[in-house]
Amino acid sequence: MIEITRYLECRNTYPLFFRQNENLKIIVDESELLQYAMQKKCKLGILFENDYLLFVVDLIEKLDGSRYTYSRIINRNAYNGVVIIPVLNNKIVFLKQFRHGTREFEIELPRGFSEKSKTIEENAESEIFEELGVMPRKIAYLGNVVNDSGLSGGLVHIFVCSIEEIAQLAVDEGINDTYQYTIEEVEEFIHANIIRDCFSLSAIYKLITSTHRQEYLTCS
């Protein structure tokens, strides 16, 4: 079964996503996987993959010995996704970007997948350049969050940066406008569900609780 063969290969490629814990043990014995799949008439392993992600169905064993399937997503570059808070003239720059997931325009911060060949800071700088057409004047790391511990578990790293202008938007990525908000306006729009993207919410919380808040929101 090719799905199981690829699954066992990916175990070596993404070892952090196959760490064992007795609370939810991942079954990785090929014969057991094949036997369960045939008995239950279900599919296990890598059911779909592309350049960005893998759709995985694991066989999980609980403490009481019972087993069940668990679907999840592994991002190929799962360890260094980025979200960036651009600050221009003491205001935070948000994108108006059409998102396929919601089929709506969302007001959110620049973010994206990353390249393994780059550091997380280089990825953040690249993302700002790709989406706003400008390189950061200075940049600071705020920490990381787990994007969805139940579905994927990938790390997303958060940065704040200062920029001097907005040059060229990545219209081919669904971005058709930007908005500049004070931190007070951002908090108001979060409360009003105007800003609702979870990555943006996490990033803003990281900023307002960090030592960099005053530095970046009062910079000239």
Image (tube, grey):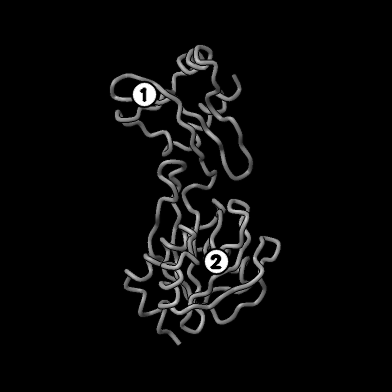
Residue at x 63% of width, y 65% of height: 130
Residue at x 37% of width, y 65% of height: 206
Q: Position of residue 70 (x, y in %)?
A: 45, 30
Location of the N terminus by quadrant is top right
**Separation of residues labelled 2 and 1 (CA atoms):** 41 Å
Using residue 49 as the reference point, say whether residue 13 is left or right of it. Answer: left
Say whether marks 2 and 1 touch (CB < 8 Å). no
* Residue at the limit of the structure toward the bottom, as seen here: 220
Residue at x 66% of width, y 60% of height: 173
Residue 107: mark in rendering: 2
Location of the C terminus by quadrant is bottom left
* Amino acid under disc 1: Glu
Please tell me whether residue 117 is drawn above or below residue 201 in the rendered image: above
> Element under label 2?
strand
Q: Position of residue 155 (x, y in %)?
A: 44, 51
Please tell me whether residue 181 is drawn above or below residue 8 in the rendered image: below
Residue 61: mark in rendering: 1
Mark 1, residues whose alpha carbon is within 10 Å: few (<14), some, or many (≥20)? some
Using residue 68 as the reference point, say whether residue 210 is left or right of it. Answer: left
